[in-house]
Amino acid sequence: MFFSKKPHIPVFPGKIEVFSRHCPLSSASSHKKRIPGFSKVGCYQNLMETIDLNRANITHFLDVAGGNADYLPKQTIQINEGTEAGSFLRMLEYVISLPLNPETIVYFVEDDYIHKPLWVNILQEAFEIPNIDYVTLYDHNDKYFFPIYAKLTSQLFVTPSCHWRTTPSTTQTFAMRFKTLIRDLSIHRKYSTNRKISADHEKFLHLGKKGAVLISSIPGWSTHAEPEFASPTIDWAKFFTQQVGIV
């Protein structure tokens, strides 16, 4: 099983605000290998089946330059950028315009991620750890075999449901408190401005040099849907096609 019968339920003053970006045909990801059974429709279904709407709100963005997505709700916000970096910047401007509480947890999600049930609780648990700035539920497999990480060291943490490690970087799917996003806004803009694809690795290295702490869950509670780099210890193809009920 992926979770206990009596999961720890963190107590926070408000809901997580989830912002999900969609682009049916994306030059940033169309060349990537995918886990068996992958589809962006399936990733959307997985996200909506595993989110706890009593504990999280969700807003969807569709980059219409990449085509239509009939599976998204009518309330989806449409943008017309045609690049990953451009769509991220448009979403960013929308989010920072909202009157959110500074302590609100904000979670940015790309359209090619898969989540396990109870990820909302797990994400909230991460922010119970003192002095944490950024969180990813993706345990990057490349951190275990890329030569550049041969001497990587991490600080470990434990919360009621899983362990966590500090990690140098992640993708554009990550979470932080609203006040952290505002604090680091110029850096988030910098690594997406005048680019087709955001320089996410470089961005998080920059944030790290500024003192920001990024942690990832171990094992991963989500994964990017690339088989070579998927969060280890989990048969994601089986999970995606059978346990979530996606065909």
Image (cartoon, grey):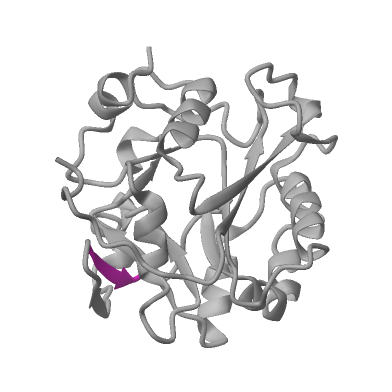
- With 81 as the anchor, is 141 left or right in this view? left
Residue range in magenta is: 162-166
Q: Residue 137: image x %, image y %? A: 38, 55
Q: Is residue 189 left or right of residue 170?
A: right
Q: Does residue 165 show up magenta in the picture?
A: yes
How far from the left and from the top, in percent, is residue 17? 60, 56
The structure residue drawn at horizontal position 83% and vertical position 38%, both measured from the top left corner, is 81
Classified by dominant secondary structure, the portion drawn in magenta counts as strand
Residue at 32% over, 50% down: 221
Is residue 44 visible to the viewer in this orientation of the structure? yes
Residue at point 68% right, 20% down?
69
Is 73 drawn above or below residue 233 in the view shown? above
Q: Residue at x 49, y 34 (%)?
A: 48
Q: Give residue 97's position: percent from left, percent from top.
A: 83, 63
Q: Closer to the camera, 98 or 25?
A: 98
Q: Residue furthest top?
A: 247
Left or right: 247 in relation to 84? left
Residue 63 x, y percent position in the rendering: 76, 33
Q: Is residue 95 magenta?
A: no
**Quarter of the image with the C terminus in it:** top left
The part of the image, by quadrant, that contains residue 163 is bottom left
Against 94, residue 225 (above or below) is above
Relative to 168, 196 lies left or right: right
